[in-house]
Image: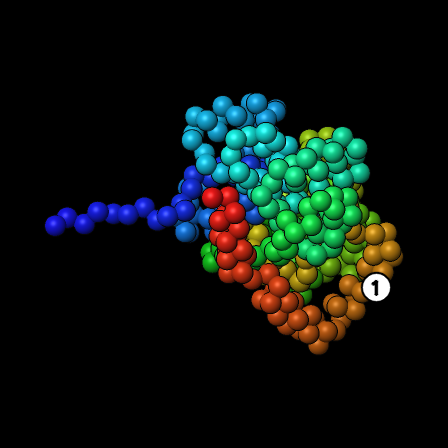
Amino acid sequence: MARVARVPTGIMRILFLAVLRAHTGNAVTAARIRDHLEAVGHTCILQDALDFESPSALASLISAEKFEAALALHLYRGGRLLQGQKIPFGIIFGGTDINEDINHGEKKQIMGTVLEEARFAVAFTESMKEMALTKWPHAKGKIHVQNQGISTMPNVTFNWNTFLQSAEINQSADNLHIFILICGLRRVKDPLYLVDAFSEWHQEEPNVYMVIVGPEVDPVFTSEVKARVKRAAGVQLMGEMPQEDLHAIVKNCFAVVNTSVSEGMSAAVLEEFVQLAKRLVNDPVLEKKIVTKGKEYARLCHSWKSERDTYQNLMRKLQ
């Protein structure tokens, strides 16, 4: 007798809305979560939230593609499009939701409505969840905390010396201390924050560099960044690169820095930054300790498997 293939129960056709600019954190996060869902048999279709102006514009796609459930990254950017749709959905908070949009009256109201309709919401940190609950207490019991999972795949053919040459850093890699800032060129990421501090440090110690790597998101701001970096000795600017190359860069560089306004960096950090960075450069024992602790923290708190289990389990709330 011929065997009949069975479709696993609970398998759904899922619409996933996110802002999908190439080589950005949003796109990487969305692709990773999509892979988690497809690993258990769901069909998960990524759509750029910026392609739709309103919920009604999205409704025809949902009907035509026969989506049974939806997920959105960003409570406002993606979630607002799911208001009133005839399919169940879940929401993943973005940093912009809590750090920026929550302070705008109309956006806050829309996000509150989205939270009421959502079957569940995911926050990347406990502090993000607590901030959300101060604004939308009705969401208590609906918000789950799941740190972002980490899965690195450095390009094994990546050549560090070639990268340095393309960044116009013509020194022996053995004696260099390269600090990397990875971000899209837009104001909220504040890539110019450390430029002057690094330029002054480079003039004292010519083997210290900062390299900014990322896509040109905001054309006007990109021009400003290029002009400023051009005048700053010891600071170089590189364009967007594939994720596997970025992982290889992180593996080879001395340290990674983050200057995003939306992720809570304060002016006090700049006042202390060079002093602490110099200590790190000159103290190999401290460097090794930080690397070891960092790896352990990532293993415990940013487990790729834990993230996969969480999203696969949450999908059951949409069935």
Let me know if residue 9 appears in the view. Answer: yes
Judge by depth and name the residue closer to the eye, 87 or 301: 87
Residue 90 placed where, x, y %? 57, 43
What is the secondary structure assignment of the residue under circle 1?
Answer: helix
Residue drawn at point x = 82 percent, y = 49 percent: 196
Residue 316 placed where, x, y %? 49, 49
Judge by depth and name the residue closer to the eye, 237 or 231: 237
The residue pinned by badge 1 equals: 275
Judge by depth and name the residue closer to the eye, 148 or 142: 142
Give the image quarter of residue 198. bottom right
Dot 1 amino acid type:
Gln
Residue drawn at point x = 59 percent, y = 26 percent: 55
Residue 74 placed where, x, y %? 64, 40
Residue 288 placed where, x, y %? 67, 73
Report crowding for label 1: few under 14, some 14 to 19, many 20 or more residues within 10 A (C-alpha). Answer: few
- Position of 99 compared to 310: left or right? right
